[in-house]
Image (tube, rainbow, N blue to C red):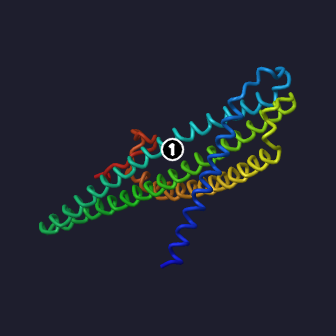
């Protein structure tokens, strides 16, 4: 009990230290960014302007990735609703088949059996589409994380550029900072960005494979008239409909 309590106390202390260190780094960055460069000749601020431009571009990429993620989530919701509709159609065909069997009419039974098989294939395609859309959401999340980490690296590079410009201009306020501090922060951010973007590339590959699987299932059904194109759903891809009678 005593040992467990000590371990818990140590964990809390370590967590507090990490939070404080993180907050310290953030406050130092905020302090550096608050300092004006008005005393620095414009021709010596080129590195800062370039770093700011790159940061703005990455911020825009992150915003676009976030918008794409929200749209992908809506597409997944639509795919789930199509599965529900396909399940209802299949259930209806199963009930109709039971009713036709009671009539003793072989031709009618065979026709409804064919319709049930078509409804079952349509459901399989709809389920494959959900799997694809879910993997696509995962890929969109990973892409947004990639751009977020890239943006954090750009922030670190911008801080370093501002520091160098101020240091070269003789600003005494930067004496509390060191080059090593900025190099380390930028290197860590770059490493995290590289890891996140590799993960994004892997998730994008998964999404392409899931799409190929859905299209492979969809092709034969579409050829038999089990799909309509157009019209299209909100996702911009063909919607499932009931099998042709």
Does 141 appear above or below 117?
above
Measuring from the top left, give residue 227's x and y in whole percent: 39, 49
Does 136 appear above or below 103?
above
Measuring from the top left, give residue 33's x and y in whole percent: 69, 32
Measuring from the top left, give residue 61's x and y in whole percent: 62, 37
Q: Nearer the viewer, residue 17 or 34?
A: 17
Q: Is residue 129 left or right of residue 176?
A: left
Q: Quadrant of residue 102?
A: bottom left
Measuring from the top left, give residue 160's x and y in whole percent: 78, 39
Q: Secondary structure at mark 1?
A: helix
Residue occupying image coordinates x 30% and y 52%: 85
Q: Is residue 112 left or right of residue 33?
A: left
Dot 1 corresponds to which residue?
Answer: 69
- Circle 1 packing at 10 Å, graded few (<14), some (14-19), many (20+), is many
Residue that extends furthest to the left in the rendered view of this protein: 103
Residue occupying image coordinates x 68% and y 55%: 195
Does 39 appear above or below 135?
above
Does 162 appear above or below 25?
above
Figure label count: 1
Q: Nearer the viewer, residue 162 or 133?
A: 162
Q: Is residue 231 left or right of residue 164?
A: left
Residue occupying image coordinates x 39% and y 61%: 124
Q: Quadrant of residue 29?
A: top right
Residue that extends furthest to the front in the rendered view of this protein: 2
Q: Quadrant of residue 165?
A: top right
Q: Nearer the viewer, residue 215 or 100?
A: 215
Q: Nearer the viewer, residue 125 or 71?
A: 71
């Amino acid at each position: 009990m005593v040992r467990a309590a000590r371990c818990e106390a140590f964990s809390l202390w370590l967590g507090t230290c990490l939070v404080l260190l993180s907050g310290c780094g953030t406050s130092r960055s905020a302090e550096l960014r608050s300092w004006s460069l008005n005393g620095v000749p414009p021709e010596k601020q080129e590195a800062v302007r370039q770093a700011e431009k790159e940061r703005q571009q990455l911020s825009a990429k992150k915003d676009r990735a976030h918008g794409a993620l929200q749209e992908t989530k809506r597409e997944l919701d639509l795919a789930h609703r199509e599965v529900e509709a396909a399940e209802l159609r299949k259930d209806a065909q199963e009930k109709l088949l039971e009713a036709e069997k009671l009539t003793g009419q072989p031709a009618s039974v065979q026709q409804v059996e064919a319709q049930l098989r078509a409804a079952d294939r349509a459901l399989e395609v709809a389920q494959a589409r959900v799997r694809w859309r879910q993997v696509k959401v995962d890929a969109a999340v990973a892409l947004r994380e990639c751009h977020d980490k890239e943006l954090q690296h750009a922030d670190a590079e911008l801080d370093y550029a501002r520091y160098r410009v101020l240091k070269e201009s003789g600003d005494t306020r930067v004496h509390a900072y060191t080059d090593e501090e900025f190099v380390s922060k930028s290197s860590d951010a770059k490493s995290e960005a590289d890891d996140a973007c590799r993960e994004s590339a892997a998730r994008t590959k998964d999404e392409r494979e899931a799409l190929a699987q859905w299209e492979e299932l969809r092709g034969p059904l579409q050829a038999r008239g089990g799909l309509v194109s157009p019209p299209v759903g909100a996702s911009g891809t063909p919607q499932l409909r009931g099998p042709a009678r």
